[in-house]
Image: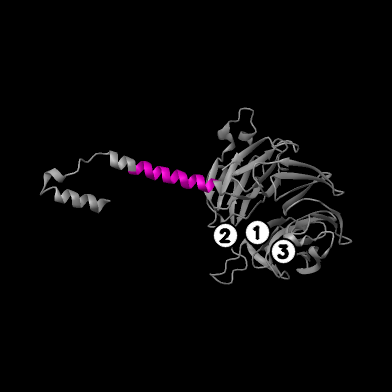
Amino acid sequence: MTSQLTAVLCRSSFDHQMAPKYNIQNHLQLFLFYIELVCIVCVLQLLHMSVFSQSFSPCGRYLAAGNNYGEIALFSLSAALSPDATVQSQKPVLTFTAHEGPVFTLISSDCHLLSAGNGEISAWSWTELIKKVTVSLNTQQPGKQHDLIIPEINAMIINPRDNSLVVGGGDNNVHILDLEHGVFKSVLQGHSDYIHCVSVREREADILSGSEDGAVRIWDSRMDQSVHCIEVYKYESCARPQYGKWISCVTTDSDWMLCGGGPSLSLWHLRSLSPTSIFPLTGCQRQAAFHQDMILAVGDGPFVSHCLLGGEVKAQIPCTPQSLNTLQLNTNSTEHRVLTAGGSSDHIEVFTNLSYRAFSLSF
């Protein structure tokens, strides 16, 4: 554009009649075209956005959410739940790029927000984030063997028994990070495919991991050894070959375990290592949680499922996203006690009562 204009202006010294009638309108049209293009890109990003992870602040007044573009958004629950809340109150108070790839998992310690994406774990101070300061305090890379091989990190959970971080991901291993010293102290090897989910049993010193290989492994954290391997897809009552054998979610409550994915979501008694209830939910469940005398689950489908421990589906509460990846219950603040769910949308559903969706937060 600049070179063409220069050529025309040079020729005008020989033929004054050829000189263009220059005005700002041409530049204004170009500027408006650029703005329109940026707006289209932003709209397309929102249309293709997925929320993969969530975590509440230690005080319970804020929610952090991670998406497929490597962004973390911080929402003020105090503002969103206020009687004077506006549409703007449901928008992030802070959005920043935390990783080059998707933010697959988020978890909070007493002081920090830990985020993980492709091959790295970053730590952020909650105090600084609330002040809108986004400086990563530390970055760890578990199991990095080659610059060209960067395994994704799919799941993290804090083990309060020894103040360690349990990490599972694309290298098929479970890594244990000592949070006090910031070093990886052990690696649990046994899965033959990448790991989707991890959980802990504090009282028994057990770590559980669910993998693409179809197994839930139970590890003794004191010996760093696998003590049990449950191949869920081999149980006829759980198997669903049409969905595969992968395990996408696992969680525990005392002597009980919930797991599902390709196989049906099922409740297991860990002392007998046997399933006691099978939940007749369609599609793959990506996250499940124990809540009082119920089980909450999300996955393929625009709803949060409420199930009874005996296996019955009590209710399915409609949501905006057509599928859901993450479910979180805020237990850090009685004043801001909400259930939140996110998935294939830029919206995060907020439930102030488990029976209905109150409103949506959005990136």
Question: Going by the picture, which residue comes out furthest to the left?
Answer: 14
> Picture coordinates of residue 48 (x, y %)?
56, 49
**Distance between the Cα atoms at labels 3 and 1?**
10 Å
First in residue order: circle 2 vs circle 3: 2
Q: Which mark is residue 139?
A: 2
| Residue 151 seen in render | yes
Question: Going by the picture, which residue comes out furthest to the top?
Answer: 84
* Picture quadrant where residue 315 is located: top right
Residue 118 part of the magenta-drawn span: no
Q: Depth check: 169 or 130 in front?
A: 169
Residue type for callout 1: Asn
> Picture coordinates of residue 192 (x, y %)?
71, 70
In front of the other: label 2 or label 3? 3
The image's colour scheme reads: one colour
**Distance between the Cα atoms at labels 1 and 2?**
16 Å
Task: Identify the residue under disc 1.
Answer: 154
Q: Residues within 10 Å of mark 2 (few under 14, many from 20)?
A: some
* Picture quadrant where residue 61 is located: top right
Q: Residue 211 carries which label?
A: 3
Say left or right for 137 vs 333.
left
